Amino acid sequence: MYLGIDIGGTSFKAGLLDDSFQIVDMATCPADRSPQDYGDYLAREMASLTDTLLSRNNAGDKVSYVGAGIPGFVDPAAGQIMFTPNLPLKDVPICSLFQRYSSLPLLIGNDANCAALGEYHAGSGKDASSMLLLTLGTGVGSGFISEGKLYTGWNGAAVEAGHMLLVMDGRPCGCGRKGCFEAYGSATALIHDAQEAMGKDPDSLLWKTAGGSLDGVTGKSVLEAKRLGDATAEAVWRNYLHCLAQGIINAINVFQPELVCIGGGISNAGEEDLLIPLQRSIEGHTMAQGSPKQPRLRKACLGNDAGIIGAALLGLS
Amino acid sequence: MYLGIDIGGTSFKAGLLDDSFQIVDMATCPADRSPQDYGDYLAREMASLTDTLLSRNNAGDKVSYVGAGIPGFVDPAAGQIMFTPNLPLKDVPICSLFQRYSSLPLLIGNDANCAALGEYHAGSGKDASSMLLLTLGTGVGSGFISEGKLYTGWNGAAVEAGHMLLVMDGRPCGCGRKGCFEAYGSATALIHDAQEAMGKDPDSLLWKTAGGSLDGVTGKSVLEAKRLGDATAEAVWRNYLHCLAQGIINAINVFQPELVCIGGGISNAGEEDLLIPLQRSIEGHTMAQGSPKQPRLRKACLGNDAGIIGAALLGLS
C-alpha cells in the first residue's frame, strides 16, 4: 500500500492507496496558518494524518514511506522545502522534521510534479512511456515523466513549462518575468481576456453567462457564451486556443513526449472545444515532422486526486 | 577505444578516440551529393572511413561500435534517419544499411545531441551532473544530458530548445513557425539585426568593420564595432543579449541543468561581452530562486571536434 498527502493552502489531504493505486481511505485537516514554527506544525500534522489512516486500516506494516506534494519549490534530493508562495515555509528541512513524529521516511515533491506522477501511473498516462502534464487553472502547472522517472532537474525546480515565454516583454507574470505561457494559457488569463473583451462589447453574451458582472466570469461562462454563438466570446476563445497551441508546441519541441496530458479546470472544456482544435493546431508544426511517433493530447482523468496519488507514488520514481 | 563520424553537408569526418576520449587519428572524405541511393552511399563511405582508421591504428579489436552524428532528425532507437534538410536522406534505415559494409554495429544521433554528449563527457561539462548545450551559429542547436543519459524524447526529435518561441507570431523561422528563439538568438539573427541597423545609420562603424558592405557583416564584425564604441552596434548587441538571456531563462526553467554550455561561433565573443552579461541577466529571473543550486553558464571548449567525440560516445548513453 501507499500513503500520499497533498499539502494545500487551505487543507492537508492524505490518502491511502491499495497496490493498484486506488484510494481506499482519506483523512484531511484544515491548514491552520497561525503556528509560528510552521515546518514543525506541518510535520506533526502530516504524521497525525498518517497515523489516522494507518491505524484505521490496520496498515501499519504495509506502507514503507509517506509521500507529500508541496505547493512550491522543493529540493527532493535534499528533503527540503525551498519556498512556498501560499504557506509560510522557507528553507524547511521537512523530511528530517517529519522524523520527530513518525518512524516512516518522508519523500517530497512539487504538487504539479506529484499530479503528473499520479496521472502517469494511475490515470491518463498509464499506457505512455513518457508524459508531460499541463494543468490549466489559476496558473499553468507542469510535470514530466519519462520511463517511470519524474524529472525534477538538478535543483528540484523543473519542469516549469508555464514559465517559458510566449511573448517576449509581454504580460507581467507572477514569476516576475513578462510574457510567460502562464500569463496567456491559464484560466486566469482566459478570464482576463474575456473581461477585457466585455469592456469593449456591452452587448456580448459574455455578460449574460457571467450573471451580468465582470466578477462572474469563469472559464465555463466564456465557453457557454461561445457555444451560444457569441462572436466576442468566440474570438476570445480562439485567441486563447492559439496561445495554448503555441505553448504546447514549445513544450513538445523540448520534451517530445508520447503524451501531453491536459488537466486543470480548463480541461473540462472537452474534446470538441479544446482537445480536437488543439491537436489540429499542433499537427504539422512540431519538430518531429515525418515521424510516425507524433505526441498525442489527452485529458487528465484523476482530477484533484492526482496530487495525492502521485505523492503516494513518489517512491516509484 | 571509440570511433565517431560527424556527417556534414560538405564532408564526413571520422575520429578514433583513446580511452580518455582524446582524438588520436582522423579520416575525412568529401560528401558527394550525386549518388542516387544516398543511404547506401553513406553507409559505404562510413564503413570505409571506419576501416581506414581501424587498420591504420591496429585497432580492429579495440572498438565495439561506430557512432554517427547526423545533421537532421533521427530516431536513434529505430536506427533510422527520418529527414535531413541538407542531404538527400529521408526515412533511411542507416543502421541496418551499415551492416552491408561493416561487422560493427552503428549507433546514430542528431549532430547537436552528439556535440552535447561530447562536451558533457570530454569538454566543458565533464564535472556537471546535467548539462544543456546551446550552439549559437547558423541556427540555435541544443542537446541535453542528465546523469550521463542523452535525452532524445519518445521519437528522437528532442531537445529543440531553439524552437521554443520567444515572440509569438514573430519573425519567420526555418522550422515553419514564427518567433522561435533561433530566429532571434542565432548568429544569423544577429547579422540580420546588424544589417537592418546599418540601413538606418550610414555613419555606423558597423559599415567599417564589415568592410563597407552588408554582405561583410559577421558576428565578429558586429562585436568589433561595438568594442570601438559604436552606439548602433552597442544597441544591436544589447538587444541580441536580451533575446539570448530570455531564451536561456526559458530553457533553464524547463531543464534546470547544473550547467548551460554555450557553443557555436557566437561563443567566441568571450566572457566580458557574452557570458558575464548573460549570467547577470539570468540571475534572479529563473524559477529556482532561493536555491543555492543556480545553473551556471560556461563556454563550450571542444569546437568542431565535439560532434565527432560525442558520436563516438553514443554508446555510453
Image: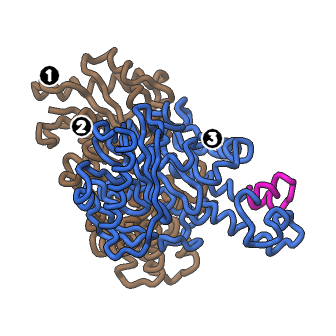
Chain colours: A blue, B brown
Label 2: chain letter: B
- Magenta portion: prevailing SS class: helix
Residue B290 in percent (x, y) is at: 32, 71
Q: How many marks?
A: 3
Q: Position of residue B298 (x, y in %)?
A: 27, 62
Three-letter amino acid code of the residue under disc 3:
Glu
Q: Secondary structure at mark 1?
A: loop
The structure residue drawn at horizontal position 33% and vertical position 63%, both measured from the top left corner, is A81
Tag 2, which secondary structure? loop
The CA distance from mark 3 to mark 2 is 34 Å
Tag 2 residue = B313
Q: Which residue is mark 3?
A: A283
The quarter of the image holding the N terminus of chain B is top left
Report the mark closest to the observer, 1 or 2.
2
State yes or no: discs 3 and 2 in contact (Cβ < 8 Å): no
Q: Tell me the distance, in whole angstroms, between the alpha carbons under discs 1 and 2.
A: 17 Å
The foreground one among A249 and B55 is A249
Q: Residues within 10 Å of mark 2 (few under 14, many from 20)?
A: many
- In the image, residue A129 sits, relative to residue B161, either above or below, namely above
* Label 1: chain letter: B
Give the labeled residue for mark 1.
B60
Inspect the image, locate mark 1, and give the three-letter code of the amino acid beneath it: Gly
| Magenta region | A222-237
Q: Position of residue B58 (x, y in %)?
A: 10, 25
